[in-house]
Amino acid sequence: MVLSGVSASAPTAHQLVVWGSNVSGLTLHGQPWRLLTYQFVHAGLSHLLLNMFSLWLLGLLVEDRVGPWRLLLVYLASGVGGGLASLWWHADGINSVGASGAIFGLYGLLLVLLIGKKLVLDKSDRRAMLGLVLYLVLSNLISGVTGNIDNAAHLGGLFTGLLVAGPLALIGLKKPA
């Protein structure tokens, strides 16, 4: 985006639309592919870096356990779930970008792995990890109450990862060693 002249710190709404943001009027009227592309478009370099750091940390925790393809499936499905939740919640219109819905889906997957005891952790570490994940999810949602943060996408991604994509990713998964 930046190489095409888009600002690295504050792209305009129009520029985000051109690059594939999730815009109600377009996504719902002939451009459903935006439910995928919006996950890769960000509202500036800081937004991108924060999401990529979160993705990296979550990837370290779950990729070895579920593998790269299942991780990608949960990521993309959760992003779509987040995008759909955003469109539903913001019935008057939205122009949404970012990987946060997909990342929240990975939080959901991590919760599925922790609750289902699919990660090798002792009881104390499992409780600590559950507490940490719940803290991160809640603190992100609370901080999203102010500003231009799409909590509907966060919740949609979380519930997609927790209730749909996460459990499906466990099918055929071998027990931890």
Image (cartoon, rainbow, N blue to C red):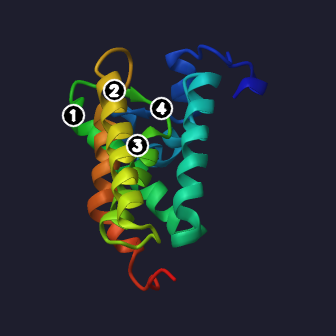
Density class for disc 3 (Cα within 10 Å; few <14, some 14-19, many ≥20) is: many
User: First in sequence: mark 3 or mark 1?
Assistant: 1
Density class for disc 1 (Cα within 10 Å; few <14, some 14-19, many ≥20) is: some
User: Which amino acid type is marked by label 4?
Assistant: Val
Residue 127 falls in image quadrant: bottom left
**Residue 136 visible in rendering:** yes
The residue closer to the viewer here, 159 or 11, is 159
Q: How many marks?
A: 4
Residue drawn at the location 52% of the way across and 19% of the way down: 14
Q: Nearer the viewer, mark 3 or mark 1?
A: 3
Residue 7 shown left or right of residue 154 in the figure: right
Tell me whether circle 4 and circle 3 mark residues in contact (CB < 8 Å).
Answer: no
Q: What secondary structure is found at the residue carrying circle 1?
A: helix
User: First in sequence: mark 4 or mark 1?
Assistant: 1
Residue where numbered disc 4 is placed = 97
Q: What secondary structure is found at the residue carrying circle 3?
A: helix
Residue 94's disc is: 2
User: First in sequence: mark 3 or mark 2?
Assistant: 2
Residue where numbered disc 3 is placed = 101
